[in-house]
Image (cartoon, helix red, strand yellow):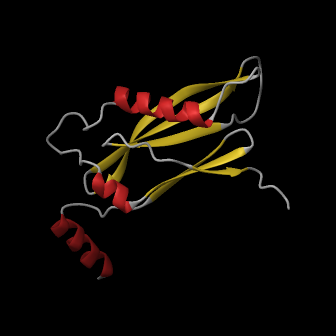
Amino acid sequence: MGRLVFSLAVFLCGGPPLLAQTHESYGIGKRYIVTISEEALRKSPAWDADAENPPLSARKALKLADEKKAKLVQDSKSRKWELQAIALMPGGDDKWYWLVHYEARPRVGGTGINPFLRLAVLMNGTVIDPKVQDYPPRKE
């Protein structure tokens, strides 16, 4: 019965509800937490079901994410931050955002999991500022 009521509510409201979403990434000595609030999604334009392309192009989203990345992480002698992927992510109710994934690749050799950074770009061009924490947390 509960599922029926939820399904009916979703149908009458035009789609799944907006949901806050969080993405964590782990850089070199830092953790980055990107939280996309329901309010932020609500303020960004919807991707109309009849439109072939989203309101913000992948190229523009990547440019904006690159600018934010440059303020958060830098290349070193041993690692270079490189784009790994850019993906459209559903936010509910025809709201979408871009999730841009970077990795700090070793310049020579290397094994294991690379440090990575994920940034979210809303369809209005807003790049969500991540909460930055020391990782692992410092012991007091």
Q: Position of residue 13 (x, y in %)?
A: 19, 67
In the figure, is residue 36 to the left or right of 56? right
Q: Nearer the viewer, residue 133 or 2?
A: 133
Name the outermost residue toward the right. 140
Residue drawn 28% across the image and 62% down it: 16
Q: Residue furthest front?
A: 71
Residue 37 found in image quarter: bottom left
- Judged from this view, the residue extending furthest toward the left is 50
Where 132 sits versus 114, above or below?
Answer: below
Tell me which residue sits at (59%, 39%) in the image.
Answer: 117
x then y, percent, for residue 64? 42, 32
Q: Position of residue 78 (x, y in %)?
A: 76, 22
Q: Quadrant of the C terminus?
A: bottom right
Q: How many marks?
A: 0
Describe residue 40's horizontal placement relative to residue 80 as left or right. Answer: left
Q: Residue furthest top?
A: 108
Q: Is residue 124 above or below residue 112?
A: below
Residue 54: % across, % down = 26, 37
Residue 27: quadrant of the picture? top right
Residue depicted at x 50% and y 47%: 129
Q: Nearer the viewer, residue 136 or 126?
A: 126
77 on left or right of 94: right
Q: Quadrant of the N terminus?
A: bottom left
Looking at the image, which is closer to me, 20 or 68? 68
